[in-house]
Image: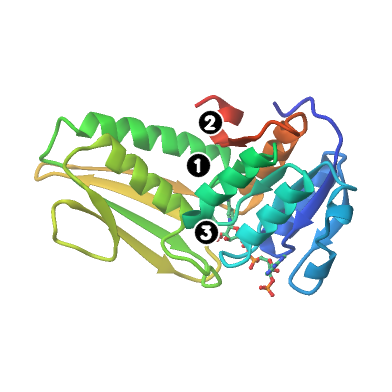
Amino acid sequence: MYYFHLVMKIALIGYGKMGHEIEKILVSRGHTIPLIIDFDNTDQLTAENLNACDVAIEFTTPATAYGNIVSCLEAGIPVVCGTTAWLDRLPEATEICQRNGGAFFYASNYSIGVNIFFAVNRQLARMMNRFPEYDVTLNEVHHVQKKDAPSGTAVTLAEDILTGIDRKTSWQLGTTTDPEKLEVTAQRRSVVPGIHTVVWESEADTITIDHTAKNRSGFAMGAVLAAEFLAGKRGAGKVYGMKDLLGF
Ligand SMILES: NC(=O)C1=CN([C@@H]2O[C@H](COP(=O)(O)OP(=O)(O)OC[C@H]3O[C@@H](n4cnc5c(N)ncnc54)[C@H](OP(=O)(O)O)[C@@H]3O)[C@@H](O)[C@H]2O)C=CC1
Ligand SMILES: O=C(O)C1=N[C@H](C(=O)O)C[C@H](O)C1
């Protein structure tokens, strides 16, 4: 997967921490970036400018992601989005993608390590369905600039745990003593790129799984791999995720 790829023209929408990290990887893989959109030139996000590119990669803010995705889909350009906390509008984006014969890729976390961690989390939750003596909690830590809580990654982990076990019916941000609720806590500290921890606890013992991002390079590499994956998908009318890219 890392060795062969088409060289593409990529539109970068959002030129903050992730936009800059993705730019480094795009350049190192021979891609060019004819269009960069940030908060101060959003008027440049036109169908004409987008159509000078093969794929767009969107990492902006919870409030702006949906509009940017729709602009890409309506312009007929495949789009990879990593922005979190806008997913209440995913059904609408999916409908627009299908109607326009678009190609849309979304993941709450593009890191391959995190996606392996997701698979371990799903497997552990399925096993724990037989062992009600274990309670489960989830914690995430991120840098102080992060706008949303809990993180999109924590939401994915929580939803996968709820799918795996019958004894929890929903997740809640903050502490709770309700046994049917999955407690999800979030801390904001310094420049932490992202730490996610799932704890299963019984009277007898504790099982902890965690993922710590050392920097943003894993997120950025995964987003670029997703863009390369979308290269041949123009006109597909489909929404893709990391399971399509990685096979698990
Ligand atoms: N899926 C994944 O793997 C990952 C997802 N993320 C998510 O990606 C998003 C971005 O993260 P990050 O790069 O750290 O955030 P940053 O705040 O560093 O960057 C976002 C950039 O987008 C700009 N922006 C605001 N509005 C628009 C707009 N309408 N069009 C284009 N650009 C705009 C912001 O400008 P201004 O600051 O002026 O608002 C800022 O420069 C977050 O939702 C985060 O949770 C982050 C890492 C990995
Ligand atoms: O905002 C961030 O930084 C991150 N956001 C994503 C999330 O909300 O899960 C992914 C990663 O944890 C970093």
- Please, what secondary structure does the residue beneath circle 1 have? helix
Q: Which residue is mark 2?
A: 243
Q: Amino acid at mark 1?
A: Val
Which residue corresponds to mark 3? 86
Q: Is residue 209 visible?
A: yes
Q: As displayed, is residue 198 above or below residue 229?
A: below
Three-letter amino acid code at disc 3?
Trp
Dividing the picture into quarters, in which one does residue 185 lie? bottom left
Local crowd size for mark 3, using a 10 Å CA cut-off: few (<14), some (14–19), many (≥20): some
Most foreground residue, 217 or 1: 1
Q: Are marks 3 and 1 in contact (CB under 8 Å)?
A: no
For mark 1, what is the residue?
114
Q: Earlier in the sequence, mark 1 or mark 2?
A: 1
Q: Position of residue 230 (x, y in %)?
A: 72, 34
- Is ligand 1 closer than 8 angstroms to the Cβ of mark 3? no
Residue name at image x 21 percent, y 34 percent: 128
Q: Is the residue marked 1 within 8 Å of ligand 2, measured from its CB?
A: yes
| Disc number lying in front (1 or 2) | 2
